Image (cartoon, rainbow, N blue to C red):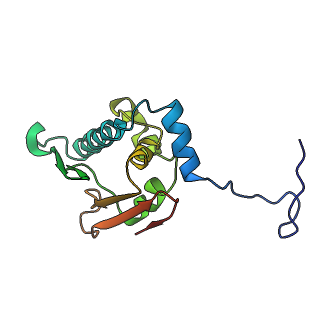
Amino acid sequence: MTLPHTPASPAGADRTFQVDLRGLVDLLSHHLYSSPRVYLRELLQNAVDALTARHGLEPGAPADAFGIRLYADGSVVRVEDDGVGLTEADVHTFLATIGRSSKRAEQVAEQRADFIGQFGIGLLSCFLVADEIHVVSRSARTPDAPAVEWRGRGDGSYTV
């Protein structure tokens, strides 16, 4: 199949796919996620993986030094962990790019088997039950970096 190119860009120029986030979430909910409650499992898996990465940074720390906490209050569910965290650059790279996972990065390739998730789509499951997701994080790899807050919306936009 051949499609005509738009006059605004020269023939053969690289272009970027556009993603309809709502359509993608709908597709995932019908074919990958069996229940809207799967978002909780995905958040807990992300927290466990963050703890695994943190333990890799601080292998001598006691096993109970880091933990995961779950809170539910009305319509708000919050998962907190003492994991490795993210810098602002990480947020743009991993949270704002569907399908990109920190667990596939070169520096953790040898630890990959230790992680539960690897595909970079688990956070999308939250859009099955919410129109907006808030992530507040501070990197343990860069302790002097400030905390960063990412707010992703179901329309595909986000702010940091």
Taking the spot 90% from the left edge, 46% from the top edge, the residue there is: 2
Return the x and y of residue 52 as percentages of the image width and height.
26, 39
Q: How many marks?
A: 0
Return the x and y of residue 25 as percentages of the image width and height.
51, 45
Return the x and y of residue 109 as percentages of the image width and height.
43, 37
Q: In the rendered view, tell whether residue 159 sits above or below residue 5.
A: below
Q: Picture quarter containing residue 43?
A: top left
Q: Is residue 118 left or right of residue 46?
A: right
Return the x and y of residue 40 as percentages of the image width and height.
30, 40
Residue 2 visible within the image: yes
The one nearer the camera, 70 or 147, is 70
Q: Is residue 7 left or right of residue 55?
A: right
Taking the spot 54% from the left edge, 51% from the top edge, the residue there is: 22
Q: Is residue 114 left or right of residue 4?
A: left
- State which quarter of the image contains the C terminus: bottom left
- State which quarter of the image contains the N terminus: top right
Q: Picture quarter containing residue 18?
A: bottom right
Taking the spot 24% from the left edge, 43% from the top edge, the residue there is: 51
